[in-house]
Amino acid sequence: EVHLVESGGGLVQAGGSLRLSCAASGLTLINYSIGWFRQAPGKEREGVSSISSADGSTTYADSVRGRFTIVSDSAKSMWYLQMNNLKPEDTGLYYCAVSEYGGLRTRTYEYEYWGQGTQVTVSS
């Protein structure tokens, strides 16, 4: 069973930075996708970024491209989301997730394993 734990969230002013961490245990898959998602109050969970274990390719939502960077340290079963130039609209509960399908997966239904989330709040 894959277990994921996110950390690194907090309260930051607009324009600031945070680095989220995702620690995985029990991950024995060879090909998988790691995704970061977020959910704001009253809104659906949305994909932020994902990375493929096969070739390290990445994808980003248009709203975060150029500001967020997904980083993999698969040898340590750790993944990170570096978030720069944060905006109030980035506020939400951030989740990391694992997809067994491999490749680049961006849809929530493509992910089988989820962490409990870490809260990010950006003040204006």
Image (spheres, grey):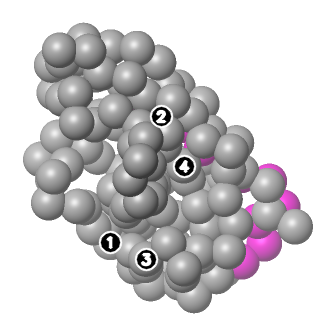
Residue 95, disc: 4
Could you tell me which quadrant the N terminus lies in?
Answer: bottom right
Mark 3, secondary structure of its residue: loop
Instruction: Say whether residue 25 is magenta.
Output: yes
* CA gap, disc 4 and disc 2: 9 Å
Amino acid residing under circle 1: Ser
- Comparing 108 with 22, the one in front is 108
What is the count of numbered marks? 4
> Mark 3 vs mark 1: which is more N-terminal?
1
Residue located 49% across and 39% down the image: 93
Mark 1, secondary structure of its residue: loop
Q: Which residues are magenta?
A: 19-29
> Mark 4 vs mark 1: which is more N-terminal?
1
Mark 2, secondary structure of its residue: strand
**Is label 1 or label 2 in front?**
2
* CA gap, disc 3 and disc 1: 16 Å
State the residue position of label 2: 20
**Is label 3 or label 2 in front?**
3
Amino acid residing under circle 4: Tyr
Residue located 50% across and 72% down the image: 108
Amino acid residing under circle 3: Arg
How crowded is the residue under tag 1: few (<14 C-alpha within 10 Å), some, or many (20+)? few
Image position, residue 124 (x, y; %): 17, 14
> Mark 4 vs mark 2: which is more N-terminal?
2
Residue 107, disc: 3
